[in-house]
């Protein structure tokens, strides 16, 4: 059984960190008011509820920020009855990313999406800006604002090309997506307010208006730390969930037993209010401190799709399924010196054989991050539609019946 005292301490620490970190914009507010739903009452993370995914141990925070140096920031936009959107920033390190690029790769599961900057990432094998997530029609605005942010950094006065990396999912069911409300102020705020420590999850930032498996989706994160005998490396994952299928949690048929799943309409009578529940997208951002280059980062990113599949994703025609992976290993940074060539060092990379534990780590962390995006999200109404949060009590009852909770596994 879990250590309930430790869980309470972890919950308290996470709440204190979250209260000083998230940017929230309401109908009458400007950017800068600080609120958070990082630990909303009654909405535990999956692991706190007893859903233990896989065999590897999470990092201390079970978040992408367990990878040293990685920070995450959100700007959440909730205005009136129709605006439910935002932007999320993931920074590989706290320095000037253009002058100290990180090795990176993109893997595409299905390319029905708008991942700005992806071709250069795969051509050169590096990322030079924060990774930004937002809503579909805001991609050009977020890319433009990210360029403004990077050009203004000290040391970038002579820069004439910036490859901003911006991913998206479509939040148009709950959000007035055509309004394109995310702009320069929101982007700057998300980047400047990014932080380490606990990560806000659920209906925040780029996950404010998303839907997953017919329930409220959002931002979720998880991590895995390899034992010292395997290098002690950490893999962290953050997702923006907005896709469909037949939800499975630890193999239990949760979506089917809750009566909300892809093709239910075609298979029998239903009251489901939308007819393309499998369409949508997911953005998967992967960080690791392991010394691996573009080629093995792409292999790592590809394995995240296995974690996505474990959750019951349908991989529909209308789903854009993207993974972005980067390494924070300081010795691998690509240093761009003004008026000089890129500076690289001779470093020892992990062998192909050493990648296998990292593959398992990213599979498990992706799966759990998706569950966290559902567990932490809250029921949301926008544009005349209401999307229910995943019902925790009923879900746990299903998981108990199928032996999919921690206490069941320990018997």
Image (cartoon, helix red, strand yellow):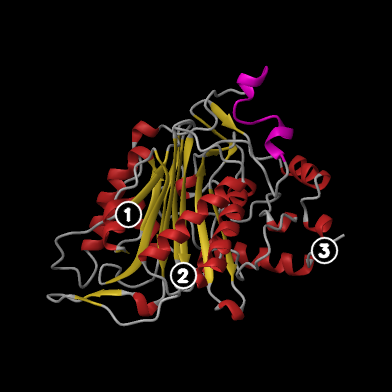
- Residue reaching furthest to the right: 411
Estimate the spatial distance between the alpha carbons at disc 3 and disc 1, rounded to whole Å: 42 Å
Q: Is residue 23 visible?
A: no
**Numbered label attached to residue 220:** none
Is residue 256 part of the magenta span, yes or no? yes
Residue displayed at 71% across by 39% down: 254
Callout in the foreground (1, 2): 2
Estimate the spatial distance between the alpha carbons at disc 3 and disc 2, rounded to whole Å: 37 Å
Sort mark 2 into few (<14), some (14-19) or many (20+) by Cα contacts within 10 Å.
few
- Badge 3 or badge 2: first in the primary sequence: 3
Q: Quadrant of the C terminus?
A: bottom right
Q: Quadrant of the N terminus?
A: bottom right
Question: Mark 1 sits on what residue?
Answer: 165
Q: Would you place residue 175 above or below residue 360 in this image?
A: above
Q: Is residue 97 visible?
A: yes
Question: Mark 2 sits on what residue?
Answer: 352
- Badge 3 or badge 1: first in the primary sequence: 3
- Foreground of the two, 267 or 35: 267
Residue displayed at 38% across by 48% down: 167
Residue 399 in the image, given as x and y percentages of width and height:
77, 46
Question: Mark 3 sits on what residue?
Answer: 1
Query: Is the C-beta separation of discs 1 and 2 under 8 Å?
Result: no
User: What's the magenta region?
Assistant: 253-271
Q: Quadrant of residue 225?
A: bottom right
- Considering the numbered disc 2 on the image, is that residue within a helix, a strand or a loop? loop
Residue 149 in the image, given as x and y percentages of width and height:
27, 59
- Considering the numbered disc 3 on the image, is that residue within a helix, a strand or a loop? loop
Residue displayed at 37% across by 53% down: 132
């Amino acid at each position: 059984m879990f250590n309930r005292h430790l869980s309470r301490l972890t919950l308290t620490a996470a709440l204190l960190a979250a209260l000083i970190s998230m940017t929230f914009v309401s109908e009458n507010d400007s950017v800068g008011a600080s609120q958070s739903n990082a630990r909303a009452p009654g909405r535990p993370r999956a692991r706190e509820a007893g859903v233990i995914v896989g065999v590897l141990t999470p990092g201390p925070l079970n978040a992408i920020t367990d990878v040293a140096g990685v920070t995450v920031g959100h700007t959440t936009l909730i205005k009136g009855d129709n605006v439910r959107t935002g932007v999320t920033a993931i920074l590989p390190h706290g320095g000037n990313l253009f002058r100290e690029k990180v090795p990176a790769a993109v893997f595409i599961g299905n390319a029905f999406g708008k991942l700005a900057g992806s071709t250069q990432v795969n051509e050169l094998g590096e990322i030079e800006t924060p990774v930004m997530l937002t809503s579909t029609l805001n991609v050009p605005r977020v890319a433009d604002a990210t360029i403004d942010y990077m050009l203004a950094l000290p040391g970038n006065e002579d820069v004439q090309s910036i490859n901003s990396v911006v991913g998206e999912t479509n939040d148009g069911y709950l959000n007035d997506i055509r309004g394109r409300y995310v702009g320069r102020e929101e982007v700057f705020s998300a980047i400047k307010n990014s932080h380490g420590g606990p990560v806000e999850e659920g209906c925040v930032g780029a996950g404010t208006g998303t839907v997953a498996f017919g329930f409220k989706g959002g931002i979720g994160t998880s991590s895995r730390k390899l034992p010292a005998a395997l290098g002690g490396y950490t893999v962290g994952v953050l997702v923006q969930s907005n896709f469909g299928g037949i939800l499975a949690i630890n193999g239990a048929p949760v979506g089917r037993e809750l009566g909300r799943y892809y093709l239910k309409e075609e298979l029998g009578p239903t009251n489901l209010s939308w007819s393309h529940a499998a369409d949508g997208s997911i953005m998967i951002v992967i960080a690791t401190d392991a010394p691996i280059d573009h080629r093995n980062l792409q292999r790592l990113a590809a394995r995240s799709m296995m974690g996505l599949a474990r959750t019951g994703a349908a991989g529909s025609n209308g789903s854009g399924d993207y993974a972005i992976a980067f390494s924070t290993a300081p010795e691998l940074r690509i240093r761009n010196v003004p008026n000089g060539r890129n500076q690289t060092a001779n470093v020892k990379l992990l062998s192909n054989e050493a990648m296998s534990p990292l593959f398992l780590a990213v599979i498990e962390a992706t799966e759990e991050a998706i569950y966290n995006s559902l567990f932490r999200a809250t029921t949301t109404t926008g544009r005349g539609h209401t999307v229910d949060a995943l019902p925790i009590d009923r879900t746990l009852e299903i998981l108990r019946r199928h032996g999919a909770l921690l206490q069941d596994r320990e018997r």
